[in-house]
Image (tube, rainbow, N blue to C red):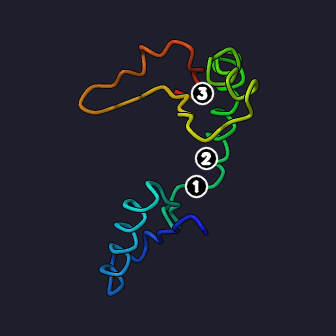
């Protein structure tokens, strides 16, 4: 099974209906998908990925490994019914909350 790939360029033009159907199916059956031809610079994406990984290592990794979830996996090896969520939520509309997340580096902001 492969992660669904949605080509954003195909939303404009004669393949729109087919692409919308693929998008619907990806959301319904997978809950996520990969986007191609979105126009975001690869260097920017690589920089954001590097910053997110750095943020995790510096601010979240220890807390995750100290969590009951990680200890449970370590003790039992069972990963089937675990909620792997390790997140923080940033929103920008209607009002941004980014200043409330004090551990974000200036670059990541």
Which one is nearer the viewer's eye here, 71 or 48? 71
Dot 3 falls on a residue whose secondary structure is loop
Dot 1 falls on a residue whose secondary structure is loop
Q: What residue is disc 3 on?
A: 107
CA gap, disc 2 to disc 3?
12 Å
Q: What residue is disc 2 on?
A: 44
Residue at (32, 83) in percent of width and height: 13
Residue at (66, 50) in percent of width and height: 43
Q: Position of residue 67 (x, y in %)?
A: 63, 17
Give me the disc on residue 70.
none
Instruction: Say left or right for 90 vs 35.
Output: left
Kindly indicate whether the residue at mark 1 contacts the one at mark 2 (C-beta within 8 angstroms): yes
Kindly indicate whether the residue at mark 3 contacts the one at mark 2 (C-beta within 8 angstroms): no
Instruction: Say left or right for 93 vs 3.
Output: left
CA gap, disc 2 to disc 1?
5 Å
Q: Position of residue 17 (x, y in %)?
A: 30, 80
Quadrant holding the N terminus: bottom right
Residue at (61, 48) in percent of width and height: 45
CA gap, disc 1 to disc 3?
17 Å
């Amino acid at each position: 099974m492969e992660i669904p790939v949605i080509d954003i360029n195909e939303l404009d033009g004669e393949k729109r209906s087919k692409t919308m159907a693929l998008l619907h199916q990806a959301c319904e059956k997978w809950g996520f998908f990969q986007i191609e031809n979105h126009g975001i610079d690869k260097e920017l994406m690589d920089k954001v990925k590097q910053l997110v990984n750095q943020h995790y290592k510096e601010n979240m990794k220890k807390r995750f490994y100290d969590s009951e979830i990680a200890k449970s996996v370590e003790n039992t090896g069972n990963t089937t019914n675990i909620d792997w969520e390790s997140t923080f939520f940033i929103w920008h509309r209607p009002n941004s909350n980014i200043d409330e997340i004090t551990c974000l580096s200036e670059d990541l902001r």
